[in-house]
Amino acid sequence: MHSDNSNLSVIYADTLFDFTNQMISNTDFDHLILKAKNANLEQAISQLKNGDIINQTENRKVLHTALRAQSDETLSLEMQQHIEEAKQVRAKIRQFVDELHSGKIKGATGKTIKYVVNIGVGGSNLGSRLVTQALARFRHPSIAVSYAANIDADDLYQVLQRVNPEETLFLVTSKTFTTFETMQNAIAACQWLEEQLSLDSTTVLKHHFVGITTEVGRAIEFGIAPERVFEFWDWVGGRFSLWSAVGLPIAIAVGMDRFEELLAGARAMDEHFFSAPLESNIPVIMGLIGAWNIEENHAAGLSIAPYCHGLRSFPAYLQQLEMESNGKGVDIHGKPIKTRTAQVVFGSVGSNGQHAYFQMLHQGTRQIPTDFIAVAEDLNIFDGHQDQLLANCFAQSAALATGRNYPNEPHKTCLGGQRSTVIVLPQLTPFSIGLLLATYEHKIFVQAHMWNINAFDQWGVELGKSIAHDILPVLKGEEQNISLENSTQNLINFVKNIRRKMNPKN
Ligand code: F6P
């Protein structure tokens, strides 16, 4: 670690985390570390390591690190048992993936499976989709993995255009196995196969469906063969679940060995997080500086700019990870939190973002820090691209920090002072992606601890779901007597009128 006023950076596992352009003084940095010590952050980190953190409002343990840990006798027996459970499911995944790759797994008509479609949303989609995209160059040559998440039928429909029904396997990924988007898409996929193959639902579900869930009974009841259900557990939060069986589509896309390398990368970051002193602990520094930006520097958002096409879905993944975890206004005791908490996370892949929202970062009126993520060496197919990409990434971080004054042309002046972190991965490998994602998981844990938030529940999203439940029968015309908000009723009336206008015969 180098730390002085002009250079705050940490290199770990050949990965650079450069905080220089956060422009934090030594005094402020020392103050943040002291604040973290006073808040017993070190104890909280050991509690996470030992599996002692509890998601109080759901009365669940928080053990996603067990999914990538290696058993060791210093750990509690309970932790060792969970590590073993995870290992057993990984053995089952390995066998299944090997059978798929060797062409042993056939559809109902005897054709080898060549297409895999993951149906799932939120944490049952974003992480595995991101990693599958990022590792595209390691893709198994004979199997194509796609994702359908949205309840908008267009999402699934467009995926189905690209697959051959006889050769397609659907993975229904849902922690609860009740999420309406996923269940409706799973039913639609089943009906589509029944029609395409002229088979009954029992046969289709038996040969063409896999379940990935904590609710094994529900998946079996749905019609999926028990041996095709891959379990994970309620001690894994949805947005922290890609390391579990939820990562099956990744393992199918790139092979089980690479999935294990992904876990090894995450484990390497766990080891660092659990053992490094606070002042050189990467997720701690990221979390504390992020909170400092929110609380002291009035950051209006956090821009995520991966200068790497493979990581183009990273902003979407982080939106769930950060905002669903720490988008809370009350603390673990239910009391209002006095500081500001999670910020708006947004962004897009570089250099595209430079031609979209970066103008506002350079000359707008708000402090909006950016996390730049770059890759030192990329096996680019075309010469010259990677250096251009890196030059632009580094230039943006510098330009945002220093700005430039044009005394006679104020419209050109960039004031500078916009903070950023630059992360440089050595290469885009399973290991480095695992390391990167685990870094952000722990950064969020640090911030949650500092704000005294439970990062592992998401009660806010339930309210919208329950109102949608009331609206649906009214929209369908099945219920007249449910009283809805005026604004909602107006929207429904508009849709009904428009539909009548467009389909006068109905
Ligand atoms: O919308 C909230 C949420 O519960 C997320 O936390 C979760 O990742 C997602 O829905 C999907 O849930 P499930 O995996 O149970 O289908």
Image (spheres, rainbow, N blue to C red):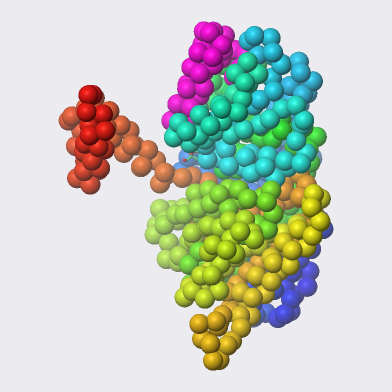
- In front of the other: 433 or 219: 433
Residue 197 within the magenta-colored segment of the rendering:
yes
Image quadrant in which the C terminus is located: top left
- Residue occupying image coordinates x 58% and y 88%: 406
**Relative to residue 230, is residue 474 drawn left or right?**
left
Res 236 quadrant in image: top right
Q: Residue furthest left?
A: 481
- In front of the other: 261 or 199: 199
- Residue occupying image coordinates x 68% and y 58%: 307
Q: How many marks?
A: 0
**Relative to residue 13, is residue 196 drawn left or right?**
left
- Evaluate whether residue 213 shows in this view: no
Magenta segment main secondary structure: helix
The magenta segment is 180-209
Residue 54, percent across and down? 55, 44
- Residue occupying image coordinates x 54% and y 14%: 196
Q: Compared with residue 310, is residue 66 higher up or lower down, i.e. above or below?
A: above
**Relative to residue 260, is residue 472 drawn left or right?**
left
Res 65 quadrant in image: top right
- Evaluate whether residue 6 shows in this view: yes
Residue 396, percent across and down? 65, 70
